[in-house]
Image: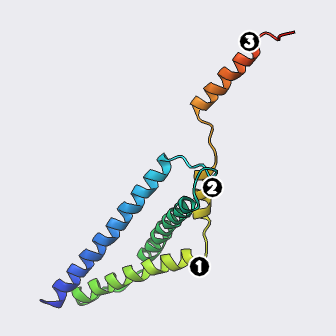
Amino acid sequence: MKIESFSRNALGEEQSKSEEQYTKNLQKLTDLSQAEYDLTTMSQAEIDKLKETTRGIEQIFVKMLTDQMRKSIQRPQSDSASLGQSKDLFEEMLYDEYGKKLTEQHSFGIADTLFRQLTTPVVRPQDLERLYQNQINTQAKPNPE
């Protein structure tokens, strides 16, 4: 097996792993947005899982940020195609680690904000309708004196 084909395969496998991770986190985000969270009824394990998921979303954001930063760097063209692919693979993995370390060591506040947003009680239209009906029924009853 030639080094060129190995590096192409490794790069392709790394990209597919990255795409799979992105798809999984996107599905988590979709599930999060559709779920209702009540901290009073959630177990500690569920709260921890929700916090872990919001940290993962923060990591995705930071990775996207570092990827854009990396793209803005002008690099000289390499003579060897295999060297360029290997370098790209290394840089991709390096910036993945940068994103992980940045979110582990310093909070950007995205995970905390997302957690608070997801766990803040929301008044739904059906709740408002029920409150309105209760108010009308309370006012409509004659006072027994």
Residue drawn at 29 percent across, 86 percent down: 86
Please provide percent x and percent y for residue 4: 18, 86
| Residue behind mark 1 | 105
> Which of the 4 image quarters holds residue 73?
bottom left
* Amino acid on which disc 2 is placed: Arg
Horizontal placement of 98 versus 44: left or right?
left
Is residue 73 visible in the rendered image? The answer is no
Total count of labels? 3
Mark 3 or mark 1, which has the lower sequence index?
Answer: 1
| Residue behind mark 3 | 140
Badge 3 marks a residue whose secondary structure is helix
Residue 8 — which label? none
Please provide percent x and percent y for residue 122: 62, 41
Q: CA distance from mark 2 to mark 1?
A: 20 Å
Q: CA distance from mark 2 to mark 3?
A: 39 Å
| Residue behind mark 2 | 116
Residue drawn at 21 percent across, 80 percent down: 8
Mark 3 against mark 1, which lies toward the viewer?
A: 3
Please provide percent x and percent y for residue 62: 50, 70
Please provide percent x and percent y for residue 97: 45, 80
Mark 2 against mark 3, which lies toward the viewer?
A: 3
In the rendered image, the vertical position of residue 3 relative to residue 36, given as above or below = below
Q: Quadrant of the N terminus?
A: bottom left
Residue drawn at 60 percent across, 49 percent down: 38
* Amino acid on which disc 3 is placed: Ala
Front position in the image: 145 or 105: 145
Instruction: Count residues near mark 3 (Cα–Cα under 10 Å), then give few for <14, some for 14-19, many for 20+.
Output: few
Badge 2 marks a residue whose secondary structure is helix
Front position in the image: 83 or 123: 123
Instruction: Count residues near mark 1 (Cα–Cα under 10 Å), then give few for <14, some for 14-19, many for 20+.
Output: few
Mark 2 or mark 1, which has the lower sequence index?
Answer: 1
> Which of the 4 image quarters holds residue 125?
top right
